[in-house]
Image: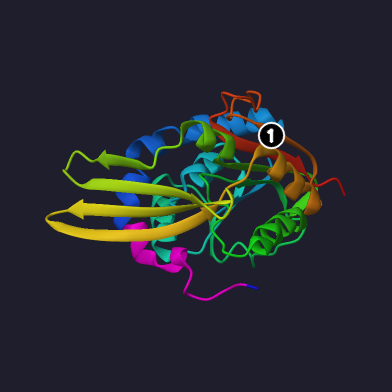
Amino acid sequence: MVSGHDEWFADESIWKDLYPFTFPESAFAVADEQVGKILRLTGLGGGTVLDLCCGPGRHAVALAKRGFAVTAVDRTPFLLDDARARAAHANLRVEFVLDDMRRFSRPASFDLIIKFFTSFGYFDDPADDLRVLELVRENLRPRGVFVLEMVSKERLARDFQATTSRELPNGHILFERHEIVDDWTRVRNRWTLIRAGSTRTFEFTHRIYSGQEMKDLLAKAGLAGARVYGDLDGSSYGFDAHRLVAVARRLV
């Protein structure tokens, strides 16, 4: 069941206030390179793509530049507006859709679906995560490919830092506090933004998965042949894994 506006990510002001930290210019600069790696991992050279939780359209625009027919879905109007402006500036056609990923359904329509930047695991109910992946399978064409990129539970276990901070050139500072909760299934975050003498604190949680847990969940959703990598270069999901990159397909 899709919940209402009490979910933390439904607060649009979070995305507005944290945008300079979440999407610095460097994040856009690497998007085309990341898309190239996605295509090498999947072996795709063209077709239809769904960018699920597209945010400000980093990968949607890069895919459209390469000639793909791109549909980009997000539930945050602010981020979609930014993505639309970027596509328009590049004179590229991208279909942008305001919707919740637990609800977006366009059966057998896409050769590739991507879901990047730990935009998976936001929901309180783990059944919602399975629902998202079931819709991914439904929306893929037969032999279509799904690529998921998110934080790695194993990396968190190896290098966990309870407190971190970042500062922008304009002097804005973000203090981040992280806590592992619910038997190592979720991370609770408390971020404090300090800017122009004012302070705002955001609290949110997200679910984390190990490589094997993600492979199991993909299989449960009906996606076949799941493989996990430690980065977009296709490195093995071993001790040095930096991220969790999963690739799976719809067979029929």
- For label 1, the SS is strand
Residue 96 seen in render: yes
Residue 90 relative to residue 128: left or right: left
State the image coordinates of residue 197 (x, y, percent, origin top left).
12, 56
Q: Eyeballing the image, is 112 above or below 42?
A: below
User: Which residue bears the numbered disc 1?
Assistant: 228
Residue drawn at 64 percent across, 25 percent down: 238
Residue 44 seen in render: no
State the image coordinates of residue 180 (x, y, percent, origin top left).
49, 48
Type of colouring: rainbow
Q: Is residue 128 magenta?
A: no
Q: Eyeballing the image, is 198 above or below 27?
A: below
Q: Eyeballing the image, is 221 above or below 143?
A: below
Residue drawn at 45 percent across, 37 percent down: 160
Q: Is residue 9 magenta?
A: yes
Q: Residues within 10 Å of mark 1 (few under 14, many from 20)?
A: many
